[in-house]
Amino acid sequence: MRHSTLPAGAALPVLKIDAVGKDYAAPVLDGVTLTLRAGEALALTGENGAGKSTLSKIICGLVTPTRGHMSLGGQAFAPTSRRDAERQGVRMVMQELGLVATLSVAENLLLDRLPHRAGWLRRAELHALAAHQLAKIGMQGIDPGTPVSALGIGQQQMVEIARNLQDDTRVLVLDEPTAMLTPRETTHLFEQIDLLKAQGVAIIYVSHRLEELQRICDTVAVLRDGRLVDVRPMAGVREADIVERMVGRAVHEHEGRPRRLAGPVVMQAHGIGRAQVVRDVDLSLHAGEVMGLAGLVGSGRTELVRLLFGADRADRGELTLHAGTGDAAGVRRIPKGWRSPMQAIRAGIGLVTEDRKSQGLLLAQSIRVNTTLSDLGAVSRGGWLRPAFERGIARRFVERLRVRSSSIEQPVATLSGGNQQKVVFARWLHRECRVLLLDEPTRGVDVGARADLYAELDRMTDAGRALLMVSSDLRELMAMCDRIGVMSGGRLVAVFERGQWTEQSLLAAAFSDAAVLPPTATDAPSFSPPPAAASTDCASS
Ligand SMILES: Nc1ncnc2c1ncn2[C@@H]1O[C@H](COP(=O)(O)OP(=O)(O)OP(=O)(O)O)[C@@H](O)[C@H]1O
């Protein structure tokens, strides 16, 4: 871990934010006053829904503040659009990718500056400029002519970052930029940030990964309930201090737990596979345990989970489901797995997906609808919905998971990212499935909320549910799981019991067969060893 030092000239204020606030139904940001200096990297932290994205979007012209003023380089600054902010050198790498999937990497990178002569696009020049831009962040291996849709999500994120690394940038806002990145990509990004800082660019870095903030930021600002509660130099600040300022209470790490007492097998996979992506995996899930799945990008973790949920169809192997005990015991065999997610859901399987926007939620619908939709039977009687009962359930989950919202009728689209993820959780908690599959379940979730979600998972295992959890964060897997399976090249290459694993042994297994699989559209092709700075972070698949 390293603290950056401000370069010479750092004393020059670039961006001044003065008493800025934003109201929707209620105030979500109020009285925020901040000064950002040339070459300074400011860590913007806070719980889910604290107002980090709202403040970032105000700075970048995407949201108009209700009150307050800003100045840029001493001049009044009130951008009316993202374009307007970009013209003045203020850019933002957003949580949601702003790329046009049908265009090429080069076209996306230089969309507003396509080189042409007499109306004709100069493709060779375009590709040369794009290649230069890509090289800045270590992506020289990518053909600038590749359509963005053919890239994995991590690579798309890198293109989005490259798009914002322009020579005229004065302020760069990065909102959770590494959530989808491999360790190698993260390293390139950090190198680039160091370079930008040395050139005097001011950085605002929004992240829930506190170790990253400590690595690259000079100052830390904490937002709580829309108000700035702390701004201080990063040097000497401990992670626990930041967390306590964010949450207003101490958060206990979920580490060193004894192994849970596992019950009988609930679900088994026998030789389950799909093409070369998942290769003949045998796996048993026991009642009352959390099994983790670790692995590098392209190792097949997400793909295996999709087979177990019926989101993709296996082309070989079999699933068996063990129902009940005693007289009610029974074994159900499902050759080649589920035909559809609906079949899996009916059998008591749930999936908390990593891609909550496209797979998990009805964004235009309320928290209430999204929470209870997975099991309308539970909130109906005789075919009639019981609205008061339904509202009661939704309220209970909002309280239990601390979903920051104005009411249970708030559309999910207007919740902050982390709070949307809690609603995905609420849906499956409501449904009470026997097996819950979790794919990167805490991505974008703040430390306090993460502890709440872990407590919910504990409650589920206490009630005899079986959980299978994919995570890129080895720390999370080591803290939460009773067993950790490691995937490599589409195979389950090792299963470690709690007490048997070390970070090194998990990584060694993850690299054992790494070169076998070609990258798929959902996986970035990076198999390089994780750097020390991100050693607990396996790449996402
Ligand atoms: N368009 C909107 N309408 C109503 N409320 C909104 C809207 N956009 C944001 N909010 C509310 O503003 C608050 C702050 O949200 P914001 O996205 O800024 O939080 P955040 O700190 O970035 O959270 P996260 O860490 O989860 O990304 C939230 O309570 C959110 O529900």
Image: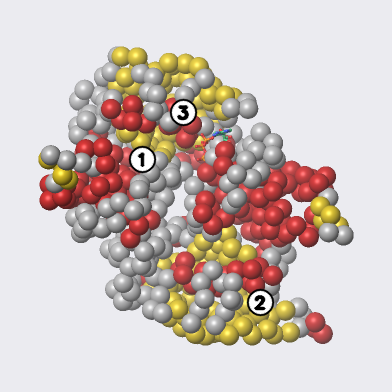
Q: Residue at x 53, y 24 (%)?
A: 22
Q: How far apart are marks 2 and 1 (CA)?
A: 43 Å
Callout 1: 10 Å neighbours few (<14), some, many (20+)?
many
Q: How far apart are marks 3 and 1 (CA)?
A: 15 Å
* Residue that mark 3 sits on: 63
The numbered mark, 3 or 2, whose residue comes first in the sequence reads 3
Q: Which of 150 and 11 is in front in this view?
A: 150
* Residue that mark 1 sits on: 93
Q: Residue at x 47, y 66 (%)?
A: 302
- CB of residue at label 1: within 8 Å of ligand 1? no
Q: Look at label 1 and name its amino acid.
A: Val
Q: Residue at x 59, y 81 (%)?
A: 319
Quadrant holding the C terminus = bottom left
Q: Look at label 3 and name its amino acid.
A: Val
Q: Which of 260 and 277 is in front in this view?
A: 277
The numbered mark, 3 or 1, whose residue comes first in the sequence reads 3
Q: In the figure, residue 264 lies in which quadrant?
A: bottom right
User: As displayed, is residue 344 above or below residue 231?
Assistant: below
Whole-percent x, y for residue 203 in the image: 32, 33
Q: Look at label 2 and name its amino acid.
A: Val
Quadrant holding the N terminus = top left
Color style of the picture: secondary structure
